[in-house]
Image (spheres, rainbow, N blue to C red):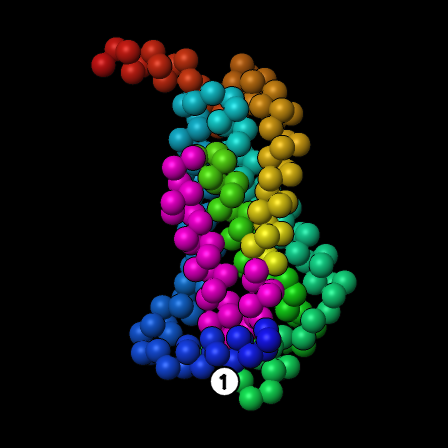
Amino acid sequence: MDSELYRNITDFAHDMPSWVQSFVEVWTELGLLLFGVLFVCAWWRARRRDTTAFALALLAPLATAAAYLCSEVAKSLIDEERPCRAVAGAATSLIACPANGDWSFPSNHATIAGAAAVGLALAWSRIWMLTVPMALAMAFSRVFVGVHYPHDVAVGLVLGTVVALIVVKLGTRPVRALAESMRTSDIGAVAWFTGPGARVHARQHARR
């Protein structure tokens, strides 16, 4: 059933106009860069908020990195061949099929996207309206271009979500304590990195 769905999606991809194909090919990698930009924006925003908000902003990329490592471990254990080589009768993938030994399950891109979307949403509540569609679009793009099965990206999204929730749950308290210590540091670079915090922000806001 998954192979048939893969064939249907790749046939659909080949029926799309060339500009749509090109956009999805770019998006499958550009989405990672955009998540990186959002990590920076979340950190900058959290510098003027309380230490819990700052801890969550720091944990978002850390959770994403942890999710990526988990997906790499899973790939090395499961050794699932890429559908662009394994599925008979499927349309040619829009991008080059990854080399032998670069296994398919789960999708690293989908895992990263799922973890980043959840981590950012926990650090910056309203951003979920952007990050969740981004993650879903990135996951779908990996099937669209022909390098993953649908179950690869579905499991990747779930794996990324679960790892992000666990990392945030376990890491918030110690990272918050670290942030509190860093905000009182005499080292200028450290104090700048953590920012002035919520009290300074509230004081500046009250003067306006």
Query: Where, by quadrant of the figure, is residue 97 drawn?
Result: bottom right
> In the rendered structure, does residue 132 fall within the stretch colored magenta?
yes
Query: Where, by quadrant of the figure, is residue 23 drawn?
Result: bottom left
Relative to the observer, which residue lies in front, 24 or 154? 154
Quadrant of the rendering where the N terminus is positioned: bottom right
Q: Is residue 31 above or below residue 196?
A: below
Q: Is residue 154 above or below residue 40?
A: below
Q: Is residue 170 above or below residue 94?
A: above
Left or right of 184 in this view: 129: left
Relative to the observer, which residue lies in front, 199 or 188? 199
Quadrant of the rendering where the C terminus is positioned: top left
Which residue lies at the image location 58% right of the left edge and 71% below the top edge?
Answer: 149
| Majority secondary structure of magenta residues | helix
Q: Which residues are magenta?
A: 125-154
Relative to the observer, which residue lies in front, 98 or 85? 85
Pick out the residue farthest to the bottom.
Answer: 89
Pick out the residue farthest to the front.
Answer: 1
Left or right of 180 in this view: 46: left
Q: Position of residue 48 (x, y in %)?
A: 41, 23
Which residue lies at the image location 40% right of the left edge and 40% below the top edge?
Answer: 127
